């Protein structure tokens, strides 16, 4: 049986522009069903169409061959992907296959449909010369077997913004200002600020088109209707009046588990530390709000260190964010930054083959040269562990301690000195 064959099913790829309309609508419905959402509205369908067209999304699916007792249009499996830049550190970006909307109907689960769709999508990306793949996950146990490792994390925080919220005396007073703008009017500025953040931030992903209807409040993704009415937008302007940060947040009807009145940050990007702390000052200054919740705070958060009472920041949860998989080991490793000169032969175990083999990694002046070799590896790891290491979100010693990297002590020491360093990766873009 070839890669995309399964008894009783037909596999298709749908063209976002010219695909059969009923099948496109059915594909969209399958994802809504798979993620336990309501049936989709026409407005939601249009928003999705705009995204798949703007981002040139490949839509794969498997439909029942006979529709006598099953849907002719709603597939039993869906898988979407598109190619977009990921910042890999040191000012470099690489194209990555971004994978989303993976669903398999309960009637066909654990029959290998995800495996088939994933295998074909990754092989196509390799054939097209795409060096990385990335996704965000619903469960942590699914994608390691396909070579994906957890490469970036986020912290969920809840901040006490009552009288506890005070900056330490040495925190400089911001000479910029904050202004409230309607989200639709703020969108162009928001997109520009995010674009700069994306260029500067290791681990950040270029946003798909659906961030526009979401953050501009044109469409309510939770309510599946036109016009999100609760979101507010604040821009930070530097001393010269140039926007360099924003916060998009909600206050209406928001309460935390203890019933305290809450603001929920939807998206917050600041290009300078001053803008970051000033936007937090602004959020803390919203009257009738006792707590501010944000799911996407950085692991190393200046807010905690700037507060006179750092315990005003409660970290509820550490969340995984971006999972990364190397498809072209030399291209991927040569693009990222390195932190010490040295040479190591790594052996990568990859069931799908794309990263498998022995690779000589030689670093000079912060740049790696990576070549396949017949030499015996002195450091061994699996493809998902290489993915986890790739953006610097975890260090070599931690993965050695976890039993996921083995090798001679000297080679591991050299590999750690070469690989570990630089700013922690930070990705706030789900897809
Ligand atoms: C990028 C994203 O879209 S993340 C969202 C993923 N989707 C969801 O969570 C929606 C609900 N879940 C589903 O639709 C399905 O259960 C899926 C897509 C997760 C899995 O689809 P299936 O077709 O059942 O997976 P498939 O049969 O190909 O399994 C492939 C391998 O993954 C394993 N696997 C599949 N699902 C899970 C799981 N939830 N937990 C652990 N292992 C899993 C299988 O055991 C199998 O292992 P093996 O081949 O090494 O023996």
Image: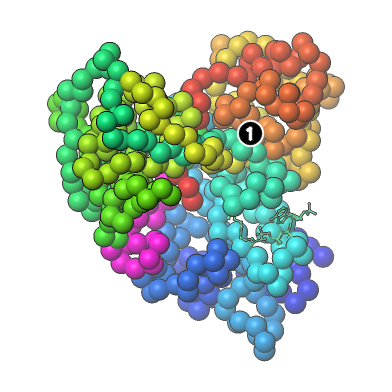
Q: What x and y, as percent, mark residue 319?
A: 54, 40
Residue 161 vs residue 221: left or right?
Answer: left
Choose top left, top right, bottom left or bottom right for residue 326: top right
Camera-nearest residue between 13 and 203 = 203
- Position above or below: 366 against 183: above
**How did the renderer colour the structure?**
rainbow
Q: Residue furthest front?
A: 258
Taking the magenta stretch, the answer to whether it contains residue 264 is no
* Residue 57 seen anywhere in this rendered image of the structure: yes
Image-based side of 136 in relation to 263, left or right: right
Q: In the displayed orientation, state which residue is furthest to the bottom.
A: 68
Quarter of the figure with residue 107: bottom right
* Quadrant assignment for ligand 1: bottom right
Q: Residue at x 63, y 50 (%)?
A: 139
- Residue 293 % position (x, y): 38, 42
| Quadrant of the snapshot with the N terminus | bottom right
Q: Please indicate whether residue 275 sits to the left or right of residue 318 in the image.
A: left
Q: Residue at the location (28% across, 35% down)? A: 162
Q: Observer-nearest residue: 403 or 352?
A: 403
The residue under label 1 is 388
Foreground pick, 327 / 101? 101
Residue in the picture at 66% in, 17% down: 416
What stretch of residues is rendered in magenta? Answer: 206-227
Quick check: is 221 in the magenta stretch?
A: yes
x, y percent for residue 410 = 77, 11
Q: Residue at x 59, y 49 (%)?
A: 137
Residue 14 visible at all: no
């Amino acid at each position: 049986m070839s890669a995309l064959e399964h008894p009783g099913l037909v596999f298709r790829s749908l063209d976002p522009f010219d695909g059969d309309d009923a099948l496109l609508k059915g594909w969209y419905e399958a994802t809504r069903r798979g993620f336990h959402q309501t049936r989709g509205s026409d407005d939601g369908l249009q928003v999705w169409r705009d995204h798949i067209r703007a981002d040139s999304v490949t839509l794969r699916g498997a439909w029942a061959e006979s529709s006598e007792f099953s849907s002719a249009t709603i597939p039993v499996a869906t898988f979407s992907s598109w190619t977009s830049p990921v910042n890999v550190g040191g000012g470099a970006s690489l194209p990555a296959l971004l994978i989303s909307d993976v669903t398999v109907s309960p009637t066909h689960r654990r029959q290998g449909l995800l495996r088939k769709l994933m295998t074909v999508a990754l092989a196509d990306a390799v054939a097209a010369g795409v060096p990385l793949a990335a996704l965000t996950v619903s469960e942590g146990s699914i994608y390691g077997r396909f070579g994906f490792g957890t490469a970036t994390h986020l912290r969920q925080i809840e901040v006490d913004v009552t009288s506890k919220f005070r900056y330490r005396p040495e925190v400089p007073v911001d000479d910029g200002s904050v202004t409230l703008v309607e989200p639709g009017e703020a969108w162009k500025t928001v997109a520009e600020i995010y674009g700069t953040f994306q260029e500067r931030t290791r681990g950040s992903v270029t946003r798909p088109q659906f961030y526009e209807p979401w953050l501009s409040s044109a469409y309510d993704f939770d309510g599946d209707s036109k016009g999100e009415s609760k979101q507010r937008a604040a821009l930070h302007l530097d001393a010269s009046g140039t926007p360099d940060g924003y916060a998009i947040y909600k206050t209406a009807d928001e309460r935390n588990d203890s019933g305290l009145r809450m603001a929920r940050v939807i998206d917050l990007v600041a290009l300078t530390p001053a803008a970051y702390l000033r936007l937090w000052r602004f959020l803390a200054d919203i009257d009738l709000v006792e707590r501010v919740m944000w799911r996407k705070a950085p692991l190393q958060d200046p807010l905690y260190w700037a507060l006179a009472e750092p315990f005003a920041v409660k970290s509820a949860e550490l969340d995984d964010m971006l999972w990364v998989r190397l498809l072209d080991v030399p291209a991927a490793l040569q693009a990222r930054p390195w932190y010490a000169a040295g040479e190591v032969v790594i052996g990568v175990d990859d069931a799908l083959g794309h990263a498998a083999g022995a690779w000589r990694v030689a670093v000079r002046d912060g740049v790696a040269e990576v070549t396949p070799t017949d030499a015996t590896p002195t450091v061994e790891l699996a493809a998902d562990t290489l993915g986890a290491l790739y953006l610097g979100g975890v260090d070599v010693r931690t993965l050695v301690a976890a039993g996921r990297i083995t090798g001679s002590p000297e080679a591991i020491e050299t590999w750690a000195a070469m690989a570990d360093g630089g700013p922690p990766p930070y990705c706030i873009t789900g897809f």
